[in-house]
Image (tube, helix red, strand yellow):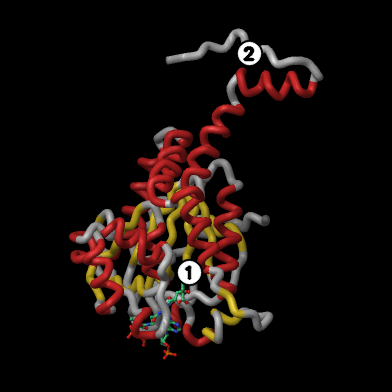
Amino acid sequence: MQVFPTKNRQVLPGISLVEWIPWNDYEDILLDRCKEGIARITINRPTKRNAFRPQTVTELCDAFSFIRDTVDIGVVLLTGIGPAKDGRYAFCSGGDQSVRGDGGYIDEMGLARLNVLDLQRIIRSLPKVVIALVAGYAIGGGQVLHLLCDLSIAADNAIFGQTGPRVGSFDGGFGASFLARLVGQRKAREIWFLCRSYDATQALTMRLVNAVVPLDTLEQEGVIWAQEILQHSPTAIRCLKAAFNAETDGMSGIQELAGQATHLFYRTDEGKEGKKAFLEKRKPDFSSELWLP
Ligand code: S0N
């Protein structure tokens, strides 16, 4: 993937604490990185309140996959571009209703897709920290995306809500169950059944977000949180993320956590001896290993 020349591009108001380097060319999103180890993904469909169509989701999946393989990136900021021409902001307003057909959202080949479900799992299992920076609307599938980020910082203009039962859709996966884990069963049912909107202070009170900051400092706050995280052990953080997921994600969560253990085991002399012995066509010698308490 090509790295473009340095040019700071602003996606949210306020002063940037880091120099953002455009990282790849997409149509619906912007992908930037900085030399401090942070990537920034911005949904860039301001005329649609940053709603996602299948192409947007494909690009988001691609960007996360690229970030996954980039070993000097530890934290991702996920946000939506703003303001739109009318001065309003949106993190994401969910699935693009103008391309919704029978059975899903219609892509450029005419196929009906719900590929946002793939994106949800990618964010969830990325062994790096994803922070949502929410300015303006986080509605429908956009609210679910913010929910699945590890941390969420809201600007004081943020508005959260579900519209599914009003617009003929619902997310009964993470959108219902993980929401209930965060805010409790009663509040989660209220959010889905009544389809009301909630401001940033209400979101903080119900533990939907970690913090609320003035809009002009939203990106700065995200960068400060990222820089603090990046001072800590990458292995500890990736194992913790997998452990938090394991508690909620059933066998696929356990698979992730166990994968981290295997990953660490491969690096030990004990793990290496097994492979070496196989390749050397001899019995493995684990006699120097202790059966620790
Ligand atoms: C976001 C809202 C509240 C903003 O209101 P506001 O500020 O009054 O602006 P508008 O004039 O309404 O909007 C400005 C322009 O943006 C377009 N637009 C906004 N949202 C969308 C959207 N989601 N899709 C397409 N276009 C959108 C407006 O049409 C307007 O355009 P113009 O200027 O040309 O008129 C308000 O806009 C709002 O309520 N938006 C709709 C929110 C919504 O219902 N989202 C969809 C909810 N459902 C999902 O997200 C499904 C998610 C999903 O894919 C899924 C996942 C898992 C399992 C199932 C599903 C499933 O599909 O069901």
Quadrant housing the N terminus: bottom right
Q: Position of residue 4 (x, y in %)?
A: 62, 58
Residue sticking out furthest to the top? 288
Q: Position of residue 88 (x, y in %)?
A: 33, 78
- Specify whether tag 1 is near ligand 1 (CB below 8 Å): no
Q: Horizontal placement of 115 versus 167: left or right?
A: right
Q: Residues within 10 Å of mark 2 (few under 14, many from 20)?
A: few
Q: Residue at x 48, y 76 (%)?
A: 45
**Is the Cβ of the residue at disc 1 closer than 8 Å to that at disc 2?**
no
Q: Residue at x 56, y 51 (%)?
A: 67
Residue 254 in view in this figure: yes
> Taking 265 as reference, is 241 above or below it?
below
Q: CA distance from mark 1 to mark 2?
A: 52 Å
Q: Position of residue 209 (x, y in %)?
A: 28, 58
Nearest the eye: 165 or 152: 165
Q: Horizontal placement of 61 versus 282: left or right?
A: left
Residue 34 in view in this figure: no
Q: Horizontal placement of 79 versus 258: left or right?
A: left
- Regarding mark 2 in the picture, which secondary structure is present there? loop
Q: Residue at x 67, y 18 (%)?
A: 273
Mark 1 vs mark 2: in front: 2
Residue identified by numbered label 2 = 286
Name the amino acid type tagged 1: Ile
Residue identified by numbered label 1 = 43
Name the amino acid type tagged 2: Phe
> Taking 76 as reference, is 239 above or below it?
above
- Regarding mark 1 in the picture, which secondary structure is present there? strand
Q: Earlier in the sequence, mark 1 or mark 2?
A: 1
Q: Position of residue 78 (x, y in %)?
A: 44, 60
Nearest the eye: 221 or 105: 105
Q: Quadrant of ligand 1?
A: bottom left
